[in-house]
Image (cartoon, rainbow, N blue to C red):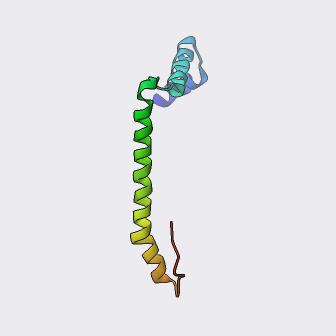
Amino acid sequence: MIDELLLKVRRGETPFYRSLRSFARNVQTSTLPLPRLIHPLLRFGFNFVSGLADAGRWFLSYFFREPLFRGRCESVGKRFRMF
């Protein structure tokens, strides 16, 4: 039942289904309008989240991946670092 409905919308068989398809495409390609006033706040949020991700990757590498790798190797250079 739902598959048939979706197929009709994809094909745009009638004006009604064409309008549903058009509406769905408009929703998929729309973006949220943002006032310029909050751009610095959003930039800070993006940088904060990126920093947390970088810190998490460093933490995993420093305390988990690198020691496991060093334990597996016969010898590792003094300045070896794993990112």
Q: Residue at x 51, y 23 (%)?
A: 24
Report the side of 53 relative to 15 (left or right).
Answer: left
Give whichever of 18, 49 is nearer the camera. Answer: 49
Q: Residue at x 53, y 21 (%)?
A: 26
Taking 70 as reference, is 55 above or below it?
above
Report the side of 68 relative to 75 (left or right).
Answer: left
Give whichever of 76, 1 is nearer the camera. Answer: 76
Q: Residue furthest top?
A: 15
Report the side of 60 relative to 13 (left or right).
Answer: left
Query: Residue 7: image x %, image y %?
Result: 55, 27
Query: Residue 11: image x %, image y %?
Result: 60, 23
Give whichever of 40, 56 is nearer the camera. Answer: 40
The answer to whether one can see residue 81 in this image is yes
Q: Residue at x 53, y 13 (%)?
A: 16
Taking 58 as reference, is 80 above or below it?
below
Q: Residue at x 44, y 77 (%)?
A: 68
Query: Residue 69: image x %, image y %?
Result: 48, 77
Say how many tags the image has: 0
Query: Residue 30: image x %, image y %?
Result: 51, 24
The answer to whether one can see residue 34 in this image is no
Q: Quadrant of residue 63?
A: bottom left
Give whichever of 42, 2 is nearer the camera. Answer: 42
